[in-house]
Image: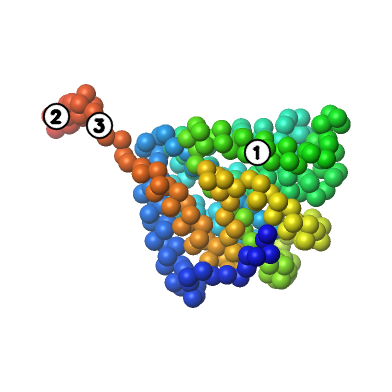
Amino acid sequence: MLRRHRPDDTGPFDDRSVAQTHLQEGLARLNTLQEKLYAQGQWTLLLVFQGMDAAGKDSAIRHVMSGVSPQGTDVHAFKQPSAEELGHDYLWRAAKVLPARGRIGIFNRSYYEDVLVVRIHPNLLAGQNLPSSLITRRIWEERFDDINAFERHLWRNGTVIRKFYLHISNGEQRRRLLERLDDPKKNWKFSTTDLIERAEWRTYRDVYGKVLAATSHHHAPWYVVPADHKWFAQALVADVIVDALERLRLAFPTADATRRRDLAKARRELLRR
Ligand code: AMP
Ligand code: MG
């Protein structure tokens, strides 16, 4: 499925500068939309970022963040689960950090790791403390069902979900990982597990294909974002977010008669002193 998507696609943009201008415009619109989202305090926006190491998740999130107020936004990075987290079902740690109404929640990786890295490395599933009778060949289908039900539940309660799979090529990942090794300022980003995961490139591509096909719905769609050019990936992500918020037809709450009277009274008081 993913084989049909080109990681080096740049859509309508011929070059970086056009995409960057477009991105800046998108971020400006995002700013106003977020203000309304927050003021209204009803809808919630949940953004999920997945992708191979060095796919550009961190930098895409940094760009989104530059267009929103930190006061209304929560970012969470999902790493190897802690002992406490492994003492619960895999959705628990995500449920704990879901954004409240009016807020934007950004997941840097997510519960999708539990049908990706955990599927690819059987020792990780073994480490999840599940009763052995529940570990059957159907477990991945069951997890897809549960993730779909979880997201549908969120949607029915006012959470708009947008999921981004940042799609890079094998060659571009090698280039970025080499940069992390060669540039002392980027050394910290390199993890030796990056090479272990890279060795499973094809398996990841196949499993990602299954995950995206099984869990993309109109209320929680996946976007395959061509990510070999970060400037394109970032512009596309911003577009999707702006579009998702514009569909909500957000508006600042309007004052009713009582509230207008209170405001007028406050105004008179302010003018008096
Ligand atoms: P990074 O995002 O590069 O900082 O790395 C975080 C690492 O944690 C990645 O290798 C993920 O695959 C791994 N990880 C995230 N969630 C889980 C999980 N539920 N089980 C095992 N590994 C995970
Ligand atoms: Mg990494």
Which quarter of the rendering shows the C terminus? top left
To which residue does mark 2 refer?
Answer: 268
**Residue kind at label 1, given as amino acid type:** Ile
245 with respect to 267 (left or right): right
Q: Residue at x 71, y 38 (%)?
A: 143
Look at the image and tell me whether residue 142 can be seen.
yes
Q: In this orientation, which residue lies closer to the viewer: 190 or 134? A: 134
Residue 243 at what x, y percent from top left?
Answer: 43, 52
Q: Under 8 Å from ligand 1: the CB of mark 2? A: no
To which residue does mark 1 refer?
Answer: 147
Residue 80 at what x, y percent from top left?
Answer: 74, 44
Frontmost of labels 2 and 1 is 1
Q: Mark 3: few, some, or many residues within 10 Å (few <14, many ≥20)? A: few
77 with respect to 237 (left or right): right
To which residue does mark 3 refer?
Answer: 255
Frontmost of labels 3 and 1 is 1
**Residue kind at label 2, given as amino acid type:** Arg
